Amino acid sequence: MIKEILYPVLVMGALSILLGVLILITMKFFEVKRDPAVDEILAVLPGVNCGACGFPGCEGFAVEMAKRGELYKICPVGKEEVANKIREILKKKKEGVSNG
């Protein structure tokens, strides 16, 4: 009676550990590197995801600003205060690239 319960539990436990390890290996192998400036800009943005800037959301805006390395559009919700913070982040990024 105990074997009928113990074997399936052991098999499923071993299978779940194996699949967990495979998932971890796959995550490391297919890891996508992201510019740290994107996370900094995203933290400064209001997070409304309104699309008023012309991008699908705050993350799209942050990715584009970090990619171009300049603030060519201003977040209509955050206005000048957020724009100044983003300029500081982009300035710090450019200085890091030119010095590093």
Image (cartoon, helix red, strand yellow):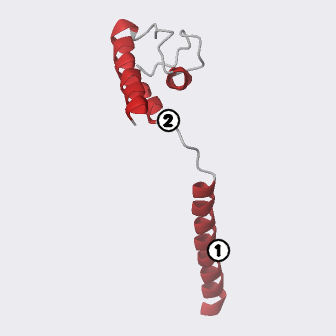
| Structural distance between the alpha carbons of marks 2 and 1 | 36 Å
Question: What residue is drawn where x is 64% and y is 86%?
Answer: 7
Q: Position of residue 24 (x, y in %)?
A: 57, 61
Residue 66's place in the image compared with 30, above or below, is above
- When the figure is inspected, residue 46 is found, relative to residue 79, above or below; the finding is below
The N terminus is located in which quarter?
A: bottom right
- Give whichever of 56, 36 is nearer the camera: 36
Question: Viewed as shown, does residue 83 lie left or right of 26?
Answer: left
Q: Residue at x 46, y 7 (%)?
A: 76
The first of marks 2 and 1 along the sequence is: 1
Task: Give coordinates of residue 12: x percent, y percent.
Answer: 63, 76
Q: Residue at x 38, y 16 (%)?
A: 87
Q: Which residue occupies 63% across, 52% down?
A: 30
- Compared with residue 63, is residue 87 higher up or lower down, i.e. above or below? above
Mark 1 sits on what residue? 15
Q: Secondary structure at mark 1?
A: helix
Residue 79 appears in which quarter of the rendering? top left
Q: Quadrant of residue 11?
A: bottom right
- The image quadrant that residue 29 belongs to is bottom right
Residue 15, position as x, y percentages in the image: 64, 74
